[in-house]
């Protein structure tokens, strides 16, 4: 979560909320204060996490086709997930 690349920090912190919520939240809060898409992604990831709507146990479909509310789903909603759908079948 301390990587120089903002993309790595964002994904690492988002995926670490389930097992290191304090550190992950701190990283996401710092990213939220920056400008751009990463800030927006961090904001809505934290919002979903704090409201209990972020499923941290099931990677699911990143495009939320199956109703899973996941980290990837939250990132896809605001355009932060560019990995495409890798599950087969999705």
Image: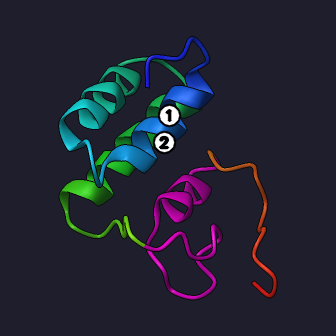
**Does the magenta portion include 80?**
no
Residue 39 in view: yes
Q: Residue at x 39, y 70 (%)?
A: 57
Residue 34 percent location from the top left of the image: 43, 17
Residue 44 in view: no
Drawn side of residue 18 relative to residue 86, left or right: left
Q: Earlier in the sequence, mark 2 or mark 1?
A: 1
Q: Residue at x 49, y 19 (%)?
A: 35
Residue with the mark numbered 2: 41
Residue with the mark numbered 1: 10
**Does the magenta portion include 64?**
yes
Circle 2/circle 1 CB separation < 8 Å: yes
Where are the magenta residues, as a range?
Answer: 58-79
- SS state under label 2: helix
- Gap in angstroms between the C-alphas marked 2 and 1: 8 Å
Q: Residue at x 58, y 88 (%)?
A: 66
User: Taking 16 as reference, is 70 above or below it?
Assistant: below
Picture quadrant where residue 5 is located: top right
């Amino acid at each position: 979560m301390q990587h120089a690349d903002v993309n790595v920090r964002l994904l690492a912190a988002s995926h670490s909320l389930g097992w290191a919520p304090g550190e992950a939240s701190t990283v996401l809060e710092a990213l939220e204060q920056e400008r751009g898409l990463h800030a927006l992604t961090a904001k809505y990831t934290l919002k979903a996490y704090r409201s209990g709507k972020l499923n941290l146990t099931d990677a699911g479909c990143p495009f939320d086709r199956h109703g899973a509310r996941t980290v990837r789903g939250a990132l896809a909603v605001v355009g932060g997930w560019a990995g495409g759908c890798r599950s087969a079948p999705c």
